[in-house]
Image (cartoon, rainbow, N blue to C red):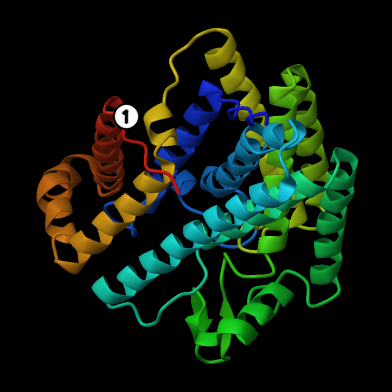
Amino acid sequence: MTASPAPVRFASVDALRGLTVAAMLLVNNPGDWGHVYAPLLHAPWHGCTPTDLIFPFFLFIVGVSIALGISPRREAGAAAAPLMRAALWRGAKIIGIGLLLHLLAWWWLDTPHYRPWGVLQRIGLCFIAAAWLALYLRPRARVLVLLAILLGYWALLACNGGYAPWSNLASRIDTALVGALAYAHDAASGRGHDPEGLLSTLPAIATTLLGVMAGDALRRDQARWLPLAAIALLLAGAAWSLLMPFNKNLWTSSYVLWTAGWATLALWLAHRLIDQRGLPALGRSFGVNAIAAYAGSAIMVYAFAGLGWWGPIYQHGFAGWMTPRFGPTLPSLAFALAFVALWWLIVRVMDARGLHLKV
């Protein structure tokens, strides 16, 4: 019986994953949400800021990791069913961690309701779906699925209320499924919306599938085609945005192509600089402990906020002495950078000791 080959590992992928997680921590933890530099905020509705690239980058890298970890085993002759069961279990654990984190937030922060959808829940669902597509469909069939998702989602939204807040189809489905438990809820109309809601997870799967395709190119030594693919995705996304605007809340099809274009370019650049030219894999420590950093930092925030420490730490450590000299926005950013630095130190120590928490 032939053993399955070990997953293909690229330092560039770990580094890019790690930088993406670090960026998540940076934009999620300013000292003062009332004073944040515009590029570090999500677009209010339509549009795409640098912050709006972070989550699709992570899902794209999830797809790359599927291509590097699962696909080689399948091509080497491993049965699809056991690989799929492992993927289901892993995705379920990611979803479970997300649900638990929201339970902790509800308990510690006294939030008005428990939120069932979330970032990790979406990651888990996209991982499961993309793993199934990678295991059971040939590359050409995956392209057809990708096109069907993007065109079908466009048609669904365009023919059922368009892209306006609250009245779009994705928001209406969120309202029907979870109502007041959605991320945002308009008490006057009874409508809800969740940026990680059910329907908008469909095009997020397309983002992950594009990562699978890029990962396949990387492991087959065809990375030279990635810049051309990136340009094609960027041009297609920009053109499509004239009809279907960029929108992270709805994860519009144009947004899928646009963000995947930048992610593909970033993957190629990281591969060139780190794998081929030997530059340090900056961000690797975050990358090999991505879930630990994300979940651990969230628990730290909930605990500090619940204990009443968050505000005093910011006030006495940053805002109190920096605001009179530099204004209120710089100390808010300095606090976020310090938070990222703290977690960089934590994952750096973990990595140095060979402690890699995986699900």
Q: In which quarter of the image is residue 70?
A: top right
What residue lies at 85% left-to-right and 63% top-to-bottom?
152
- Return the residue nearer the eye: 139 or 297: 139
The image position of residue 28, as x and y in percent, is 39, 52
Which residue of the protein is positioned furthest toward the top in this rendering? 277
Q: Name the residue under label 1.
A: 354
**Horizontal side, residue 229 vs residue 61: left or right:** right
Residue 154 lies, with reference to residue 279, above or below; the image says below
Numbered-mark total:
1
The image position of residue 45, as x and y in percent, is 60, 62
What residue lies at 60% left-to-right and 37% top-to-bottom?
65
Q: Can residue 43 be seen in this view?
A: no
The image position of residue 352, as x and y in percent, is 28, 25
Q: Can residue 171 be seen in this view?
A: yes
Residue 183 lies, with reference to residue 263, above or below; the image says below
Q: Quadrant of the N terminus?
A: top right
Residue 50 lies, with reference to residue 351, above or below; the image says below
**Horizontal side, residue 133 vs residue 50: left or right:** right
- Return the residue nearer the eye: 206 or 34: 206
The image position of residue 267, as x and y in percent, is 62, 28
- Return the residue nearer the eye: 101 or 279: 101
What residue lies at 25% left-to-right and 30% top-to-bottom?
349
The secondary structure type at the circle numbered 1 is: loop
For badge 1, the amino acid type reads Gly
Q: How crowded is mark 1: few (under 14 residues within 10 Å), some or many (20 or more)?
A: few
What residue lies at 78% left-to-right and 44% top-to-bottom?
237
Q: Quadrant of residue 62?
A: top right
- Return the residue nearer the eye: 43 or 16: 16
